[in-house]
């Protein structure tokens, strides 16, 4: 996954908060911790990713 473009939210800052990055891959959306780019990654199908975003926005 070295050639993947990861994007961080515009709302993220450099203050050490909880930041995630996402990458759109061929059939899945990758999610990782921006503070640990070499750490574990979640791979979600697009429907699951949209459901996650919907749930988070309702919090």
Image: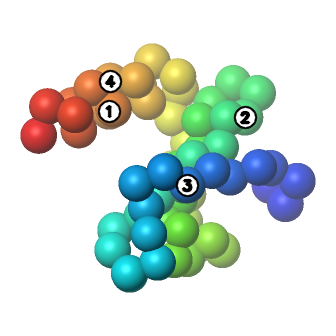
Name the residue beneath numbered marker 2: 25
The numbered dot on residue 51 is 4
| SS for dot 3 | strand
Give the distance between the C-alpha atoms of the residues marked 4 and 3, in whole angstroms. 19 Å
Q: Earlier in the sequence, mark 2 or mark 3?
A: 3
Query: Which residue reaches farthest right?
Result: 3
> Which color scheme is applied?
rainbow
| SS for dot 2 | loop
Q: Position of residue 37 (x, y in %)?
A: 62, 71
User: Residue 28 occupies which quadrant of the picture?
Assistant: top right
Q: Position of residue 59 (x, y in %)?
A: 11, 40
- Residue at 88 percent across and 53 percent down: it is 3
Q: Earlier in the sequence, mark 3 or mark 1?
A: 3
Name the residue beneath numbered marker 3: 8
Q: Position of residue 51 (x, y in %)?
A: 32, 24
Look at the numbered discs 2 and 3 and tell me whether their residues touch, using CB distance below 8 Å. Answer: no
Name the residue beneath numbered marker 1: 52
Which corner quadrant holds the N terminus? Answer: bottom right
Q: Earlier in the sequence, mark 4 or mark 2?
A: 2
Please say if 16 is above or below 11.
below
Query: Which residue reaches farthest left?
Result: 59
């Amino acid at each position: 996954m070295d050639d993947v473009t990861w994007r961080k939210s515009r709302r993220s800052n450099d203050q050490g908060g909880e930041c995630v990055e996402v990458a759109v891959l061929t059939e899945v959306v990758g999610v990782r911790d921006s503070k640990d780019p070499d750490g574990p990654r979640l791979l979600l199908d697009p429907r699951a990713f949209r459901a996650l975003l919907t749930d988070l926005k309702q919090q």
